[in-house]
Amino acid sequence: MTKLILKIIFILSIPLSALTGCNKGEIYKRLAQVDSLLIKNMPDSAMKMLEQIPEKNISDKEARAYYNLLTIQTRYRLYQPITSDSLINISIDYYQNGDKEKLARSYYYKGATLLEIGRAKEAVVCLKEAEALAYKINDNALNNKIWGSLCQINEEAGEFGLALKYARKNMNLSIKCKNNYWLAYAFNDMAFCYGDLWKQDCAMYYIDKCIPLLKDVPMKERTILLNNIGFYYINTDTTKALKYLKEAYKIKPIPSTLDNIACIYARNGNIEKADELWKEALKTANANSKINIMEDMIKYYDKFGLHEEASKISSELIKVRKNREKKHSEENVKDLQTGIDRKAERKKNETTTLYILYMAVSILLISTIISIYHRHKINKIKGNYDEAQNQIQTYKDTIKDKENIENKYKSKIEEQEEFINLLQDNKLESINKGKSLYTYVMEGGATVTW
């Protein structure tokens, strides 16, 4: 009976495990489609697809890490509030020893999230970590985002020189990649940095270069660009400024847009409408925006004789400024970045030194091996040469011996030849003498006289 129950459980577990595996594969496939939509600058469509994925069914760690990353990424792209970094921390923990691209992206969106909720110091650490990873994997798209955020952090911290450095890096990257979407934001950042440095001509130059590129930016992402264009035209062309500010307001009424429109109303004498917009803006403004808004309020309150209201705002402004200065002092983003960069530079130099040392040792080792090989080869050649010389000498000795033998026999042969020649001469002489005697007898001579 027990065996039967175990068999039934085993049989039922087969389709269940197969179903789970298919579910994981299907979810991951859909997450990859969401990622693709984000790459194509379609965050609305990405969010719709994310909402169709049942989060409670995501039990696989890899799918969970990917889902969390895409959720934070999509919310950030849609300017939705993100109040915690808990989701993205799961992604970072999972990717630490795995996918470097997704790890770099996770660090970036954690940094961007921390920046949004006012934790600039932690944001810098995460963004610099993302920057180092993006450099290693040569990810231009991620570098574009990272440098944009680092520009924003430094601009808000009052480190305008550093902000300009990152804005310029982004601009050069955007031009290199021929990406007008990136370039629009890069020109915007360049304009704002030069404006902070009181170089208005340079600021206007870059803000004007931004206008033709608006068409390359999705409508829902144009708010900041439209607002900043409007801001820079307030003092020279109010009509043009209001046109861009109203377009920005329609997309999303961010605090700085409300402030800029309020200033135009105040200039035109409608202080009531301006006051209404300023109070609305202060509800959601960060410290820097609050300071700008309050400064504008004080300026126009005094102009319209609202001195009591101006005095109240001045007291609040002093508090906000002190808090900001204290925060900047505690965060000290410039020294933090400098420290991280120096540490990275030292690590890079150490790596370079180790590489050079490794190459030197490798070259020395290879040289030693080659030297030993050549020495062995030379010794072998020398041995062959000596052997050949010995053989040659042996042959020479043999030839000499033969020559000596030949000379010995040659002298004997010469003696024999001389003896033969002598015999030949004697023979010839005898023949000639016999012939003479024969002739003599034939002619009637007597032999008595021989």
Image: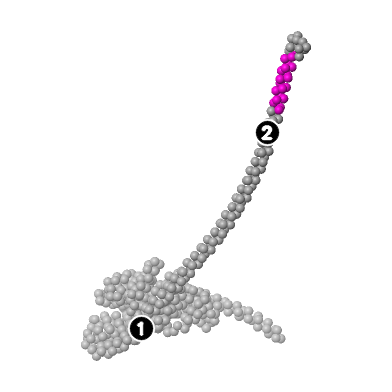
Give the magenta part as a residue range.
419-438
Q: Is residue 176 magenta?
A: no
Q: Determine whether the residue tagged by mark 1 lies in a helix, strand or loop.
A: helix
Provide the major secondary structure of the magenta segment.
Answer: helix
Query: What colour-coding does the image apply?
Result: one colour
What amino acid is at disc 2? Ser
Q: Residue at x 61, y 50 (%)?
A: 386
User: Residue 365: x and y, percent?
Assistant: 53, 63
Residue 73 in view in this figure: no
For the residue pair 338 and 222, the one nearer the viewer reads as 338
Choose mark 2 or mark 1, whichever is in front.
Answer: 2
What amino acid is at disc 1? Ser
Residue at the farthest front position:
449
Residue to which mark 2 is pinned = 411
128 w.r.t. 327: above or below: above
* Corner quadrant of residue 398: top right
User: Residue 263: x and y, percent?
Assistant: 27, 81
* Corner quadrant of residue 158: bottom left
User: Residue 373: x and y, percent?
Assistant: 57, 58
Category of crowding for the residue at label 1, using alpha-carbon neighbours closer than 10 angstroms: few (below 14), some (14–19), many (at least 20) = few
Residue to which mark 1 is pinned = 329
Q: Is residue 427 magenta?
A: yes
Image position of 184 (left or right of 309): right
For the residue pair 147 and 368, the one nearer the viewer reads as 368
Q: Residue at x 60, y 79 (%)?
A: 17
